[in-house]
Image (cartoon, rainbow, N blue to C red):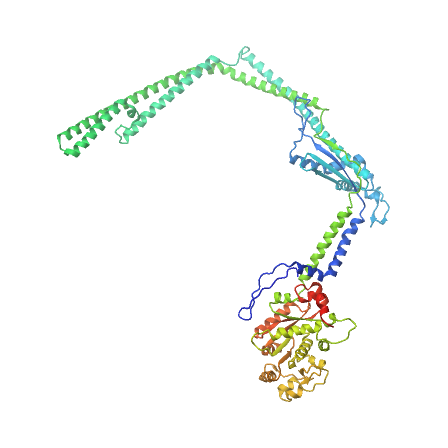
Amino acid sequence: MTKTPTQISKRIDDDSFEIVLPTFDLRSLISDLRRFTRFFVGVFIVTFALILVPIATKTPLYTATSQVMLDPRTMNTMPSQDVLSGLPSDTTTIDTEVQVLQSTALAERVVDSLHLELDPEFNPYLGGTKYFGLVKTKPISQEGLSPIAKQRLHEAIVDSVKSRVSVSRLALTRIINISYTAKSPQKATRIANEWARLYLSQQLEAKFEATKEANNWLNSRLGELKVQVEAAETALQQYKIANNLINATGDNTLGQQQITTLDQQLATVKVDQAEADARLAVAKRQLASGSAGDDVGEALNSPVVGDLRSKRAAVSQSLADLQSRYGPLHPEVVKAKRQMADIDEQIDAEIKRIISNLEAQAQIQRQRTASLQSSVGQARGQLIGNNQAMVKLNELQRNADAVSTLYQSYLDRFKQTSAQQGIDRTDARIVSNATLPGGPSSPNIPLGVAFAFLCATGLATALVFLRRAFDSGLTTGRDVETLLGQPYLAGVSDLGSTLDKSTKTTPVAYVVDKPLSVFSEGFRNLRASLIYSRLGEEVKVIAVTSSLPGEGKTTTSMCLARTMAMSGQSVVLLDCDLRRRSINRMIGKEVTAGLLEVLAGSATLDEVLVADDVTNVKFLPLAESTYTPRDVFGSPLMDDLLATLRSRFDVIILDTAPVLPVVDTRILCRKADVVAMLVRWRKTPRKAVQNSLGLLTDVGAQVSGVVLTQINVKEQSKYGYGDSGYYYKEYKKYYTQ
């Protein structure tokens, strides 16, 4: 088990347990690995060989590396810019150049330059075909190949050459490593250096082609512009002659200045007019809205209105004082009211005078605006008349100047690009040429061994855990407590695993002959667990059962009965398996009447009981009969029989049939004080045991716990961590055989 849960359980309502979460146990993990040691070693060896053998037998390859650097520096020998600009030194550009170095076009140039199509390492038609490095076929003739076949062969050679190159950037620098791998160190060095050289040559050719194309285009464009310049200058001169503008400068400065001055004055007057109209309009809106005029802007700024308002405020204050002192009809109060009315009339008259003044100012500004507009119109008419002939002339002049300037710029650029040819330089340079490698780069035997070891270990471990995951058997007492939630009563060894191969005996005889052996100790543990499984209550009837046949029920019952008898208890063993009748074969006596005859009343209990000559255990077997009454164990007669046996014996052991296939066992287990569920070590499926325990719980049987039977103590000591059998090597000498 890769994770062994530690079950901490407490009794709840006498029959339920609370199981806590599992914890990781390294020793349990190691135990699982030890358990499948052979399987692990087998998978490891096969995987290790399958990985390492191809690596070790691989043809040695050699890798040579050359280095180029993208150089952002430029040689400024010309005052102009290059036709094809230099490469920037940013990361994106460097990564792009790495891809260019791995391009098919560059690989094809290398193939053509070094004639690699004639190299058997790259041309399969020349090298033949090898089978496991032993048999080599004859070279295949290339004569008679179709053009398509030749093209495919050429592409295959280029792809083969390209697949051997490795281009990478050196950390965060501008240096690029070009590594090539071949079967020969000289060949790898030659191809790596040629790859770097052709990369620089490709850059030069790209710049040369760009300059050549630019010169051709500029030359053709200059011819077109020359014709346009001549036509523009001819049209300009003809227009001057036709309109008598030979000495014209093309402008009328005085007229323009006059218009400019008038426009500025007109703009100022319009602003003044707008301001006067706005003041008048605002004042009229305020009066129209019911205002007394005292909030008009000009009234607010008028010193007369301000003085009158001050007087009114003083009179208003005096009036309020008089009214509060003498009342509204007092002569002084009446006099103060008249003074206030006079002041209001004076304020109203002053405001009307202000409004009238605003109207006069607005009228004056409108007249000034009309006068200036008339003057501007006359000046413009004169200027238009004078410049009418200059409009066309200026247009022709501008056209001629523009065409001439464009022609001159193209002519200068053409001269510059023509002079630039021959001095183009690459944007990269070779930092170091490749040298002969000191040894093969592959196969890397140490790395291959490490890789094979890791893969073999990982796969073997994974398969061990996968196999363990599909192992549904129970191995240790901790498995019983954790996976089944049941107490672990004892572990019964497989007798053959505790003895030498030469020793011939039976478990039933050995438990008497060697009471201090490891095998016998398991039954003594089982006896103690069963007797004390119900504290405060006497345990007399013990049912021994299992989920499936072949789990050692009869052998366990016989050995347990003998062990109890040797401890001084009177024991009777009932054969309750109506289909097998296994006890008959073990007692070695002919049985003519047994349990069924006692229940049927055809024989008495004393007549059918068979005594063990060695331990005085009493057996109640089943006679060899084909007739089996229905519901024999659920009848009151069975209850009476058990009551009789309880009064005569200390312990009654019921050897029952398996729980899953036989329903009678569930009925019989309900009548027992305790039930011991036997589980064959590593064989019985866990699901079968869980189903059996569920069936017994449903009928109310008192399941005391689980017993692991037929345990191989030697195997258990290897991987049974968590169980007493794990320490078998330490304590086996303590017991006698």
Q: Quadrant of the C terminus?
A: bottom right
User: In the rendering, at what x and y percent does residue 172 appear?
Assistant: 66, 36
| Residue at image location 62% in from the left, 86% down from the top | 599
Q: Is residue 527 or residue 238 the one in the foreground? A: 527
Residue 216 rendering spot, x and y as whole percentages: 69, 25
The answer to whether residue 515 is left or right of residue 265 is: right
State which quadrant residue 621 falls in.
bottom right
Residue projecting furthest to the top: 247
**Left or right for 212, reference 483:** right
Q: Is residue 613 above or below residue 503?
A: below
Query: Where is residue 140 shown, x and y percent of the image?
Result: 85, 44
6 relative to 223, above or below = below
**Looking at this view, is 387 or 116 the one in front?**
116
**Residue 551 seen anywhere in this rendered image of the structure:** no
Q: Determine whether, in the image, residue 605 is placed left or right of residue 422.
A: left
Q: Residue at x 74, y 52 (%)?
A: 453
